Amino acid sequence: MKTYRQNTLTIKNILIVTYLITLFSGCYRYPEFDDISYNEYRRVIGSEGGTINFYRNYDNDSIKDIAVKMEFPENAVNSLIVFNMYEFYDNVTNNDLYTNLNTEQLSDFLYFVPFYESEGYKAVLTDSSDINSLIQKHTSINFNTPVTVTYYNNFNVEIPDSAKLYKIKIPAENEWGEENNVWVKYNYQGYPDGYDDIDLIYLIDGKWTENIDWGTGNLSLYNWEEVANYSFDLTNQSVTFEINSTDNMYIIAVIN
Amino acid sequence: MFKRLLPISIGLLLLSISSYGQFLHFGLKTFMMPKIYMAFFDYDETDYVYYFSNDYNETIRFSGLEESETKSKYPSPDIYVRYNNRNHLFFQAELFSMRFTNEAKYKNSVDFSKYTEIFNPFNKRDNLGYNTIKLNWAFTGTTIFAGYLFSKTKALRPYVFLGATTLYLMRLDQGKFYNDERQLRNDIIFSNLSTFKKTTLYVTGGFGFQYKAFSFDAYYRNTIADADIYANNYYENTSNISLTNRPNYDYFDSVNISISLNILSFNISKNKLKDY
């Protein structure tokens, strides 16, 4: 008669299975999540106030490397606003300022392009295939209370004692007439990429003022005005000042 | 009605389990997921946007997970214990692990040429998180199911089964690919994607074939409960939902194929047979 050898449920076998299960479970670690706050790294502000720090992109997105700090008191704005910050530089303009207007440029031209978060750029994104159809004028936002701005200069020159902070007028929508507006330019993704370069250059070099049509004037510093209250921090190579609206560019310069 | 059906079905189940022809098998199994359906909740486009305050005013707008590339490339290990009652009915409990990678997609407001010029000037990296972030997932899981074997006289026996699975999220992290210049920005994006529940529940059903100690099967795992920590926020307040505590994952389903082998088998009705 043929006999069959059957396995039995012994302690040894149970131990083997238990060992396998233990080994299997021990191969993984529990997840660990970083707790990094988006609030520290976003450029949106509301009526509750707060700070926007614009960071420079180089050097590992270092959180310590702030380009511009904006400090909003409570109720400075009425609703959620997104700020874009731009530093404009044009080599030819820099040369014109130096050679023809005896002006030494010591920083980029700083300005802000705001928009209401509720409006966003939905219209842009839903029809981004036709970027040419996207036109938007400079958005003028007046703050209820002044906003403190600290600008950390990106130029590799020390700020001399003779340097001053100037603001250059950006006309509010239709302020200089319906045909005289500063226009937003867009990149290939259909997002704003600052204001039109030529508009900015003509405002800087005075070829466009409230009395002179776009691009028809002579070189001058007509649109330049020294900021009323500001303070330089020579240790950090920064300047702190207050702004009441988004209708100006700012520059550190020496006018001889 | 359900209250009456439950005891009746349990009674029928107990009646069907006799003392004869009972086997206990311990085995090894490996499975793959040819298709993984991990879906995001749908939001209005304007809602799910990161406005980063870097000097390129980078704006990230989420569009979801990359489904086309979501599959498990590696065979996953699985150990199981199977209880066979007579020739047809069986119950199985499994413990397994699995891992896979997928990519969350987004739109970047910065032009690609400008982005690469800044972060990838020597073109050494693929796209450095320009419009995707890679997610590495690892789970362990348990499955319990009941199955029914057909054709008891054949060597190749088809079967169907249905049961429940619990998945435990063991690891979720970014692809190592991005650990460089964009770390801060990527961490923020990732931290808002870390909303998958540690424990999630599924129903698992499928069919297969048994040949001697081998089994081959295909099955579908379907999410039956919320997969996201903040899922309630989506259902309660879809129109006005903030970026924090925002649910991301709607469901996580998968198609699986597996092969298994009984390693140790025990006839636990042996003592009963001796009585006759």
Image (cartoon, coloured by chain):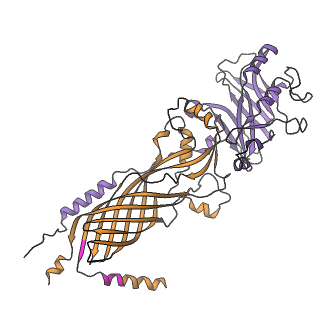
Q: In the figure, B61 relative to B223: above or below? A: above
Q: Is residue A19 left or right of residue A245?
A: left
Across and down, in percent, residue A149 comes to 72, 33
Dividing the picture into quarters, in which one does residue A144 lie?
Answer: top right
Q: Nearer the viewer, residue B171 or B134?
A: B134
Which color has been applied to chain B in this rendered view?
A: orange
Q: Residue at x 81, y 28 (%)?
A: A168
In percent of the image, x 80 and y 38: which residue is there?
A138
The span shown in magenta is B12-23
Task: Depth check: give the residue in front, B74 or B193.
Answer: B74
Residue B14 within the magenta-colored segment of the rendering: yes
In the picture, the quarter occupied by the C terminus of chain A is top right
- Res A76 seen here: no
Q: Quadrant of residue B156?
A: bottom left
Q: Position of residue A97 (x, y in %)?
A: 78, 18
Residue B136 at what x, y percent from top left? 45, 48
Residue extending farthest to the left is: A1
